[in-house]
Image (spheres, rainbow, N blue to C red):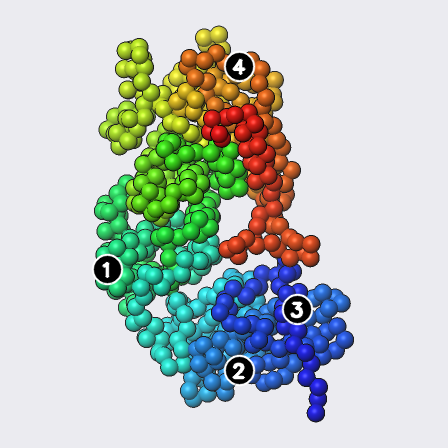
Amino acid sequence: MPTIKPNKSEEIIGEIFKDQETVYGLKEFEGIDIYDVLHISEQEPHRFYIKDLKTGNQRFVYDEQKKTGKPEEIVRQLWLYKLHHQYLYPLDRIDLEKSIHFGREVHTKAADIVVYKKDKITPYIIVEVKNPNEKKAIDQLKSYLNSEGCEIGVWSNGVEKVVLYRPYPKEFEDSLVDIPRENQTIDDLFEIKRKWSQLNPKFDFVEIVKHIEELALAGSGANVFEEIFKILYAKLYDEKLARERREGEEVLFRKYKDPEKTYEIINDLFKNAIREWPDTFELSDRIRLSPVRLNVCVPFLENVRLFEVGQGELEIIDSAFEYLITEVSKGKKGQYFTPRHVIKMCVRILNPKDNEYVIDPACGSGGFLLHTMYHVWENLHTEAAKREYAGRYLFGVDFDDNMRRISQALMLIAGDGRHHIFKRDSLDARDWQGVESEDARVALRTLTHRFENSSEEKENQISYRFLDFDVLLTNPPFAGENPESGLLRQYELAKKDGKLRNNVERHILFIERSLDAIKPGGRLAIVLPQGVLNNTNMEYIRNWLFEKARILAVVGLHGNTFKPHTGTKTSVLFLQKWDEKEEPLKDYPIFMAVSKKGGKDNSGEYIYKKDDKGNYVHDSKGRKVLDHDLDEIADRFIEFAKKEGFSFWR
């Protein structure tokens, strides 16, 4: 009787999946006791094999000496387990490595897994796991479905899955949220009703957006950003109704068998969302995708929960919007999404309180506002208090309408449907006059600075130039067209000896505008090109700053921080506006730091921490931890601030 080799599954799987180059993972199999289900043993010296769950044969998975493995075989065996034990398909209806027929020819490539109908002849489901490149794998899967007349195709790398649906004899590929169990039909999937509380709050939104782009929107001629944004708006509204008003928390945002019905329901949700949350879309707007294409999009979103998601998930949604709007804004006007670890450092250093008003005059997607909200929420203990803070104390302004709408949407998800996000030109007082600016003026009226001089007071009530915010955080655009003279005349930093300078970049004007927007004693953080703080021709700016504010800190960011979008070296300048009644100090300590680990490589790809064994370090929520030193810099500043007795860190 042959000796049973000891099961080394946990050890070998750990070795295989720690390889940073592999795009495979095991997230898809949460809930399965992987190390108990799989049996991996050393069948030859230093060579490990996995026992096939169907045939019992040994399949090679890892060479201990060469440090090479086959993660796709692990994924395949786990899919085989799921198909048999969770979807209840008998093993005699499942084949591995089944050759595919193209016409009269048998293709040399074989499908990884094929599930047959009850006749055990007709292919029903094809599963592809060997190709980790999603686009190529899905194209290959489509060809398999067409050649075999198969209805369902699954691509999975163990981290996620895409389910294609080809309603025979149609050639257009549809999608499903899942595959049917053995005792279900495809039509049964369309009848499954879900509760809001059953939706999944953990998801990779960037991948969802990519799937929708690739499978539903490619070649449609649609504005990808607009249409996905509309679909999200409809889903947000559906979730709000489900949790607050509908009996049993039933969600209506799902795929129905008839694409026309799917379109009717989701477009109605979108139209009602516009009425509930105006300003983001026109009342006459509608979803412009065809019913068939919309029906492909829906399965990727119907199982995820957007409302009441945690901080990590909001960051994922934020990064998805960043991905979506890349072509719209990143190459224009020097606008770049601020890396979230930079934002977190700025917020920690300025330490906003729950009774302080905060503004970002170039808010983009709202990152500074969101992380300010998270920071303050840590000390608020009721949901009502958190919603009150989000809807009352946070303000954002951006001239780019897409950015403004993203910020609004994120605040809708995070707060209570209220927001103070406005499309206006923060720099130009002329843009704050007239009917279009009325909403912003009304919201900011109680925050305008009050002057004792009547003419100054009257002028400020028109221009809204001087405000009384407690905290300001911003990363203004570094480039763009040179401001015209009408704008430059509004700024001291645009003049020299009473005459307008020939060329003043917008971020210089933003320095002055930002100080004007905070009250005496207020504090701000602003991301600037390093040259503003170093170049000799910028000395006049530094001298002006010394008269207006105390320099709290200067943090030089790593050169890769804003890559791949720009290699401009940047610093964050932290200021506290002098009180009107105090004489500016001439000599005081300034906190200075330079980041040595920016969290990105030279290509702009994020770098993650690893332990001594080369394995990625994960946080309490299972997310990889970014390898940067800005948290440490914030810690050192807090020590400095407490030692110096700064009021906001007492």
Q: Quadrant of the N terminus?
A: bottom right
Task: Estimate the spatial distance between the alpha carbons at disc 3 and disc 2, rounded to whole Å.
Answer: 28 Å
Q: Nearer the viewer's eye, disc 2 or disc 1?
A: 1
Of the residues under marks 3 and 2, which one precedes in the sequence? Answer: 3
Q: Residue at x 52, y 64 (%)?
A: 27
Rendering coords of residue 287 (x, y %)? 29, 53
Q: Which residue corresponds to mark 4? A: 585
Q: Nearer the viewer's eye, disc 3 or disc 2?
A: 3
Q: Which residue corresponds to mark 1? A: 246
Rendering coords of residue 516 (x, y %)? 40, 21
Of the residues under marks 2 and 4, which one precedes in the sequence? Answer: 2
Which amino acid lies under the numbered mark 3 shown in the image of this protein?
A: Glu
Q: Nearer the viewer's eye, disc 2 or disc 4?
A: 4
Task: Estimate the spatial distance between the alpha carbons at disc 2 and disc 1, rounded to whole Å.
Answer: 44 Å
Q: Residue at x 39, y 68 (%)?
A: 176
Which amino acid lies under the numbered mark 1 shown in the image of this protein?
A: Arg
Of the residues under marks 3 and 1, which one precedes in the sequence? Answer: 3
Which amino acid lies under the numbered mark 2 shown in the image of this protein?
A: Asp
Instruction: Mark 2: give few (<14), some (14-19) or many (20+) Cα within 10 Å.
Output: many
Rendering coords of residue 249 (x, y %)? 28, 61
Of the residues under marks 2 and 1, which one precedes in the sequence? Answer: 2
Q: Nearer the viewer, residue 415 or 426?
A: 415
Q: Which residue corresponds to mark 2? A: 95
Q: Which residue corresponds to mark 3? A: 11
